[in-house]
Amino acid sequence: MGGAMALQVAGLGLTFMAMQQQRKSYEMEAASYREQAEMNKIESLQQENERNRQLRIQLAALGTSMSAQGVALGTSASVSAIEEDERQLAKSDIESIRLMGMSQRRKYGLSAAGSRAGSKAALYSGAAQIGGGIYDIKYGGS
C-alpha cells in the first residue's frame, strides 16, 4: 500500500506542475495578444500619419500646378473644390484606418481575455484534480 500511495503523491505533484505550466502558457499567450494590440495601435498611427503626409503633398502639388498656370490660390472655385475633395477623401481614409485598427485591437483584447480565462480554468481544473487525488489518498478511493 505504501508504494501505491507514494505513486499517488508523485502523481499529484506532477499534476500540480502541469497545472502551473499550463497556466503560465496561457498567461504568456495573453501577454503576446496584448503586445500585438499595442503594435497594431502603433501601425495604425503610422498609417494615419502617412495618409496625412500624402494629403499635404497632394495639396502642395495642386497649389504649385495652379500657380504655374497663373491661377491665384484661393480664388478659383474649381481648385477649392478639388482641395475639398482631397481633404474629404483623406478624412474618409483616416477614419477607415482608425476603425480597422480599433477592430484589430478589440480582436487581440478578446483573445487576451480568452487566454486569461484559460489560465484560470487550468488552475481550477488542476486544483480539482489535486483535491480528488488527496481524497483518494486519504480515504483509499480509486
Image (spheres, grey):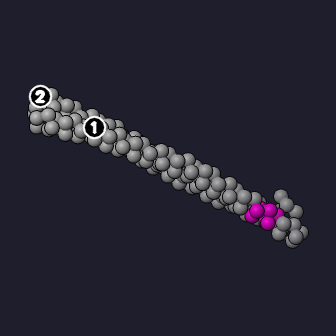
Q: Quadrant of the C terminus?
A: top left
> Is residue 110 at all visible to an observer of this figure?
no
Name the residue carrying label 2: 139
Q: Residue at x 68, y 58 (%)?
A: 50
Would you say 51 lies left or right of 68 here?
Answer: left
- Residue 137 image-quadrant placement: top left
Residue 10 position, x and y percent, is 24, 38
Does the magenta-highlighted stretch encompass residue 112? Answer: no
- Residue 91 image-quadrant placement: bottom right
The boundaries of the magenta stretch are 57-63
Q: Residues within 10 Å of mark 2 (few under 14, many from 20)?
A: few
Q: Residue at x 72, y 58 (%)?
A: 53
Amino acid type shown at disc 1: Gly
Q: Residue at x 75, y 59 (%)?
A: 56
What is the secondary structure assignment of the residue under circle 2? helix
Amino acid type shown at disc 2: Tyr
Residue 124 position, x and y percent, is 29, 35
Would you say 117 lies left or right of 78 here?
Answer: left
Q: Earlier in the sequence, mark 1 or mark 2?
A: 1
Residue 114 position, x and y percent, is 38, 44
> Is residue 7 at all visible to an observer of this figure?
yes
Name the residue carrying label 1: 13
Q: Residue at x 88, y 63 (%)?
A: 72
